[in-house]
Image: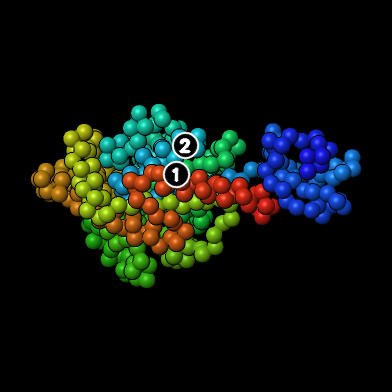
Amino acid sequence: MGGLIHNCNINENQLIENQGPSPYLHNAITWLIRTGGGLWTVVCGPSPTILIFPRLKKKIKTLVVIVGPTAVGKTAVAIKLARLLKTEVVSADSRQIFKELTIGTAKPSPSELALVPHHFINTHSITENYDAAQYARDALELISDLFEKYNTLILCGGSGLYIKAVCEGFDDIPEIPADVREGLMQRYEQAGIEWLQQEMLRLDPEHYKKIDQKNPHRLIRALEVRLGTGVSIAAFHSSKQVSHPFEILKIGLELPREDLYRRIDERMDKMIEHGLIEEATGLYRHKHCQALQTVGYQEIFDLIDGKYDLDEAIRLLKRNSRRYAKRQLTWFKRDTDISWFSANDQEKISGFVLDHQAHLHGRMAKGNYEQ
């Protein structure tokens, strides 16, 4: 075989796999080799005739998606993976994108952000209307740009709609006149979430059964689409998934319930200690913005309004955060493409990702991958 290699003028260190008799030349062997320009197929024969051509025009790209409930430890895992793979993190958190929200969104700390480049942190204002569809457009454009530099990227977050929009596509809902939403916001301010629930039940009873009935943002969005288009928002939901020019590897993080709930309670205590009440007080005049219709701020706004005392506010913060975590898990557990791991088992998670990369490399070597 050394003679064949010599005739091909390649180094034995470049050889990846002997792929057997060549279908192109009689009495010749096909090898997969690696060069500075990537992977190539080389047909080596005893004669001076040599056939050489690119194996792949592009390297395989992989988007590693890290999901899980609040406080489970997604940021720590994402940073460790990004450092291992020498890549960057794309955040998929629907609240961490807002620069005015810091303490109540548990953003990565300055020291964590210094370890690995992060994207979609502090990029927008709470005064902007920013939804999952727009996020998907922006995120996919960024991912495409970053894949020019990296073979692997990390997408990390607990916002199910954001993750779904990137991985599966999003539904293009017609633009709704601004006065429709403004009218709904005013009624919500005057009559509370009960009015939103009653309107949804009256106008769109079928979708009301499926929606998060305690989430005013979801209720308002569904109502504005119903009022603005005359049809249910469900009519715009498509079962067709988009096809991406990259692999998607989904990893779910979980913990025993008592451990997760303890982490949530400890996080809420730290948020109060670090100034959540002061942060929410500074945002009180914006309390009806879409970005603030969320656990962590609504409880403090009600405290400011005198609906209950501090002890009750803290109790509700913890209770509502635990309920939010439960809803997140319910959402993500429906996705059968997610592989689940203990958030504490970084070694297994890293091994899983590296094994997946090795498997893709094997597919490339055997010619079973179409780029």
Circle on res. 226: none
SS for dot 1: helix
For residue 231, what is the image quadrant? bottom left
Q: Looking at the picture, how far across and down is residue 62, in whole percent? A: 55, 46
Circle on res. 84: 2
Q: Nearer the viewer, residue 183 or 168?
A: 168
- Identify residue type, mark 1: Ser
- Identify residue type, mark 2: Leu
Q: Residue at x 56, y 37 (%)?
A: 150
**Sequence-wise, which precedes: disc 1 or disc 2?**
2
Q: Looking at the picture, how far across and down is residue 368, in whole percent? A: 66, 55
Drawn side of residue 9 relative to residue 364, left or right: right
Circle on res. 350: 1
For residue 6, what is the image quadrant? top right
Q: Looking at the picture, how far across and down is residue 212, in whole percent? A: 32, 60
For residue 37, what is the image quadrant? top right
Q: Are marks 1 and 2 in contact (CB under 8 Å)?
A: yes
Q: Residues within 10 Å of mark 2 (few under 14, many from 20)?
A: few
